[in-house]
Image: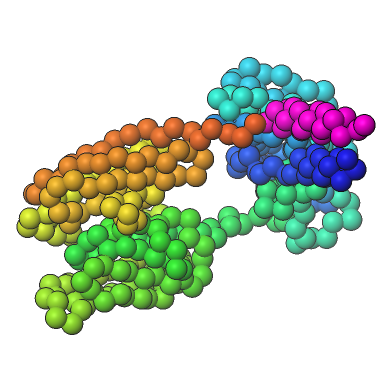
């Protein structure tokens, strides 16, 4: 009896301690004035997109922190556009309970924040002060570290426009259809552009049946370096390759892309589009791209399609490919059914406890 109850208590404790994941984004903040000196009044405003498509966890809290003195917070919660302005709150920390932000998955929940305060009189010129930091707290009141978003400013001078920490890698090959690996993670097939790549050194690898793997180190910087490569045919395999160009940019400018050959004789192509986009596409068990994607070089006949995306149900079907044509496959993805919520889990635990008590009574003489 005792060990059964101990297991049940431990199970309930785990339920209470499981943290939720980050569920918000923050708009670019508005800061006034542009130049701040010690003692100056400061106004900061932004919008926190607390939930859209996935509800904010009612067990977590949204916390805002500032380095300004005499801080006064005003916030308005908008649910599907309906406004509810809360009373002013003073202090360096503002905590918004998850119960204020937790609605259904279909609801859009935004929080408009206005912060007024003063630059600390002791702030040194050139020092970087935190005007506002937004973070999520889990059920234990601990900060979810990867959720932290900070708006900061230099004292005594305007804050320079920051250089983007991320860039893009545009990849094309001839022939097209090569699997693209970035830092040993498959990202799709050529031609494609990989966005949100952190600045620095990365490894690009291309793989295509009948050709040797090609590996190249690239550096994502604002200099937009260009790397030329040739896919070499394997021994005994006719090679009809031409140069491949890999270009990295972070300035958002035009990215050159090599012209792609026409569909190989005797094969067809498949265009796959999903709502939402970003799903992995497997053809006959092999990963061939990320939607929206066009997959060339498919033999005529029936091919299996499998589409996978986190948070959505896997989709499996078949399609017919005709030589010399591009078939289209367009579909919407269904959200994966979620596990029972916290209330449901407590109900299950209560049922388990009743079963334990009933079994114990049966064992008693």
Instruction: Identify which residue, 96 or 26, lies in the foreground.
Output: 96
Q: Residue furthest top?
A: 82
How many callouts does the rendering have?
0
* Residue 234 spot, x, y in % from top left: 20, 79
Q: Residue furthest front?
A: 365
Q: Residue furthest bottom?
A: 235
Q: Is residue 363 magenta?
A: yes
* Residue 130 spot, x, y in % from top left: 76, 51
Q: Is residue 192 magenta?
A: no
Q: Is residue 133 above or below residue 116?
A: below
- The N terminus, quarter of image: top right
At horizontal 82% and vertical 23% (from top left) the residue drawn is 87
Left or right of residue 284: residue 327 = left
Decide whether the magenta segment is chiefly helix, strand or loop.
helix
Residue 76 figure quarter: top right
The magenta span reads 341-365
Instruction: Identify which residue, 363 or 295, lies in the foreground.
Output: 363
At horizontal 34% and vertical 49% (from top left) the residue drawn is 281
At horizontal 88% and vertical 30% (from top left) the residue drawn is 361
Left or right of residue 146: residue 198 = left
* Residue 334 spot, x, y in % from top left: 44, 32
Instruction: Identify which residue, 62 or 343, lies in the foreground.
Output: 343
* Residue 250 spot, x, y in % from top left: 44, 60
Left or right of residue 321: residue 128 = right
- The C terminus, quarter of image: top right
Residue 288 figure quarter: bottom left
Q: Is residue 246 above or below residue 138?
A: below
Q: Is residue 263 above or below residue 333?
A: below
Residue 56 figure quarter: top right
Residue 239 in view here: yes
């Amino acid at each position: 009896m005792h060990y059964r109850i101990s297991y049940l208590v431990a199970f309930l404790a785990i339920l209470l301690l499981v943290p939720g994941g980050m569920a918000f984004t923050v708009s670019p903040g508005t800061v006034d004035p542009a130049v701040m000196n010690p003692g100056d009044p400061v106004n900061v405003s932004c919008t926190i997109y607390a939930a859209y498509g996935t509800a904010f966890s009612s067990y977590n809290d949204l916390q805002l922190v500032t380095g300004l003195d005499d801080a006064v917070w005003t916030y308005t919660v908008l649910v599907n556009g309906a406004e509810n302005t809360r009373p002013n709150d003073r202090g360096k920390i503002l905590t918004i309970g998850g119960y204020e932000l937790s609605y259904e998955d279909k609801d859009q929940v935004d929080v408009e924040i206005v912060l007024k305060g003063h630059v600390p009189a002791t702030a040194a010129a050139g020092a970087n002060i935190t005007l506002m930091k937004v973070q999520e707290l889990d059920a234990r009141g601990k900060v979810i570290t990867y959720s932290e978003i900070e708006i900061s400013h230099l004292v005594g001078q305007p804050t320079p426009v920051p250089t983007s920490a991320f860039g893009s890698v545009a990849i094309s090959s001839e022939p097209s259809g090569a699997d693209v690996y970035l830092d040993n993670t498959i990202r799709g097939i050529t031609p494609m552009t990989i966005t949100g790549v952190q600045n620095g050194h990365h490894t690009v690898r291309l793989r295509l049946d009948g050709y040797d793997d090609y590996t190249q180190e690239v550096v994502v910087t604002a200099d937009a370096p260009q790397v030329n490569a040739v896919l070499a045919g394997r021994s005994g395999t006719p090679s009809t390759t031409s140069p491949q160009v890999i270009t990295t940019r972070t300035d958002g400018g035009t990215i050159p892309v090599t012209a792609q050959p026409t569909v190989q004789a005797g094969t067809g192509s498949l265009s796959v589009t999903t709502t939402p986009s970003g799903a992995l596409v497997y053809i006959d068990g092999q990963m061939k791209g990320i939607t929206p994607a066009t997959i060339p070089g498919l033999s005529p006949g029936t091919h299996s399609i499998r589409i996978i995306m986190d948070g959505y149900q896997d989709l499996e079907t078949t399609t017919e490919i005709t030589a010399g044509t591009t078939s289209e496959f367009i579909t919407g993805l269904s959200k994966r059914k979620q596990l029972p919520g916290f209330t449901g889990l407590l109900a299950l635990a209560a049922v388990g406890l009743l079963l334990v008590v009933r079994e114990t009574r049966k064992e008693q003489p």
